[in-house]
């Protein structure tokens, strides 16, 4: 593959060096912010060697190359454009000016939660492995693997500790990422997160029981009582507290002399924000978070298969806009209150949608005679089955339209099916075939059947719609009249 040639062609078809304002890359995509999108020759870019798809989202123009290739193309683009050492954040900032308020809000949540996804997924998958070890009757009638092989007991206990760590100390991760996003010192944010899960506080998961028993510990300061309650597994309280911390920190710097800045600003920022968090922000937002999780769970349980079908149908369109990243905050809250919610219903429905996109892309790959399209469709279809849908979604299904229609239809039907069985995940992970280990005990079978249903419908319907589309293309002129 001639990477210098690809880079030169890209720059030309993107409207020249002057039209490219910012450039970066992620694992599979080249991300660009351009001055004028009208100058982009999308058709010509589609024909450039190595290009597997392209799309516009969040004020950015993104070109899919795939792992390994995108790095090489990016390095050659650096030489041609003179743009270097730019991050995806730089590109996102350059493209943000083109976004409306809703898009900016979604992007804000995405910027906060996407960096911590690896930690959450690692914890979720480890939790899934723990569930496999302790699940009764999964492999042995009436016994778990730990029951049958007692030597695994300590291993399962260790895995459980590893799995719980990202969720127990989640406020630290969120506070660090959110403070950075809000323009504050991320290490001060981490300190705030540590404060919110300090071992001297009542564990957040024991709050409900302590409230019923009337045994909530308090600080008594001049007759004013402040509850000593932690925020393990919480989301909304940490987000709001981190926002306040960043504003307090930056506000103090306007008044505190620079010579005292390193001494007084961190001290006052943490103290002021800490007091506000435990007196006002924390208790109020904690209740809102629980109500949000309970409300969504009630809606899922009460709307039944219709609600599941609707959510499954719209999930892929949410992925197109990037709004699916905002679901992470909701899922974490559902898992934090798992004793009440039973887990997250969003993860299984996301898996149905991902598998459907994979099935549709694979149908295209097996049917097409276009070598380049086949080379994109089959690998991206397999990737979608494993939980990563962007290559299949943007590189194949949306471009051809009929596979996308087939996929969202299949996602709606399969999501309705798993909703009938109240399928939920007790952990996060890769929303696809690997998600099996994230399911609650007893939900694995309907989850697997749902995936098979989603794949089969998407695959078959894609072929049917393709045949129908070709028939319309070859209708004789006389008949068309």
Image: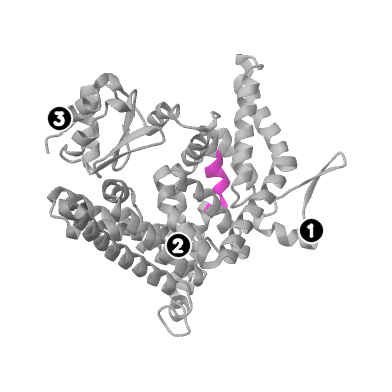
Q: Is mark 2 on a helix, strand or loop?
A: helix
Place residue 472 in its image quadrant.
bottom left
Of tags 2 and 3, which is closer to the observer? Answer: 2
Disc 2 residue crowd, few under 14, some 14–19, many 20+, Cα 10 Å? many
Q: Residue 215 carries which label?
A: 1
Q: How far apart are marks 2 and 1 (CA)?
A: 38 Å
Residues 280 and 344: in front is 344
* Direction from residue 355 to residue 298 in the image, left or right: right
Residues 174 and 148: in front is 174
Q: Which mark is residue 4?
A: 3
Q: Where is residue 137 in the image (x, y as percent from the top left)?
A: 45, 81
Place residue 222 in its image quadrant.
top right
Residues shaded magenta: 167-175
Q: Which mark is residue 306?
A: none
Q: Position of residue 441 (x, y in %)?
A: 49, 72
Q: Main secondary structure of the magenta part?
A: helix
Q: Distance between the residues labelled 1 and 3?
A: 69 Å
Residues 149 and 203: in front is 203
Of pointers 2 and 1, the one earlier in the residue sequence = 1
């Amino acid at each position: 593959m001639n990477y210098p040639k690809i880079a030169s062609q890209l720059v030309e078809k993107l409207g020249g060096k002057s039209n490219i304002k910012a450039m970066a890359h992620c694992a599979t995509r080249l991300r660009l912010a351009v001055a004028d999108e009208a100058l982009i020759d999308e058709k010509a870019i589609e024909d450039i060697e190595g290009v597997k798809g392209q799309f516009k989202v969040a004020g950015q123009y993104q070109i899919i190359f795939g792992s390994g290739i995108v790095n090489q193309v990016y390095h050659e683009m650096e030489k041609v454009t003179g743009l270097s050492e730019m991050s995806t954040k730089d590109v996102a900032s350059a493209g943000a000016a083109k976004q409306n308020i809703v898009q900016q809000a979604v992007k804000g949540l995405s910027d906060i939660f996407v960096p911590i996804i690896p930690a959450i997924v690692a914890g979720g998958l480890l939790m899934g492995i723990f569930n496999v070890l302790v699940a009764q009757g999964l492999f042995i009638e009436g016994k778990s693997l730990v029951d049958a092989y007692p030597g695994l007991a300590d291993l399962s206990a260790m895995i459980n500790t590893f799995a719980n760590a990202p969720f127990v100390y989640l406020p630290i991760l969120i506070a660090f990422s959110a403070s950075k996003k809000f323009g504050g010192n991320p290490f001060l944010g981490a300190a705030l997160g540590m404060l919110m899960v300090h071992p001297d506080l009542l564990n957040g998961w024991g709050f409900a029981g302590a409230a019923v028993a009337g045994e909530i510990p308090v600080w008594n300061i001049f007759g004013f009582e402040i509850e000593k309650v932690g925020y393990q597994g919480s989301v909304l309280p940490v987000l709001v507290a981190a926002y306040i911390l960043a504003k307090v920190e930056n506000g103090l710097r306007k008044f505190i002399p620079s010579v005292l800045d390193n001494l007084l600003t961190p001290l006052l920022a943490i103290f002021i924000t800490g007091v506000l968090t435990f007196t006002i922000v924390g208790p109020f937002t904690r209740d809102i978070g629980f109500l949000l999780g309970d409300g969504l769970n009630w809606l899922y349980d009460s709307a039944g298969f219709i609600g599941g079908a609707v959510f499954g149908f719209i999930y892929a369109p949410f992925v197109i806009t990037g709004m699916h990243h905002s679901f992470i905050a909701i899922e974490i809250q559902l898992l934090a209150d798992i004793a009440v919610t039973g887990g997250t219903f969003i993860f299984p429905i996301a898996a149905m949608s991902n598998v459907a996109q994979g099935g549709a892309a694979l149908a295209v790959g097996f049917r097409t005679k276009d070598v380049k399209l086949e080379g994109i469709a089959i690998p991206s279809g397999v990737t979608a089955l494993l939980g990563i849908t962007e290559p299949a979604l943007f590189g194949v299904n949306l471009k051809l339209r009929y596979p996308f229609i087939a996929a969202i239809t299949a996602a709606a039907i399969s999501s309705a099916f798993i909703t009938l069985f109240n399928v939920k995940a007790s952990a996060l992970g890769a929303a696809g075939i690997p998600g099996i280990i994230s399911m609650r005990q007893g939900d694995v079978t309907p989850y697997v059947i749902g995936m098979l249903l989603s794949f089969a419908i998407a695959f078959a319907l894609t072929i049917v719609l393709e045949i129908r589309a070709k028939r319309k293309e070859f209708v004789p002129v006389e008949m068309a009249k």
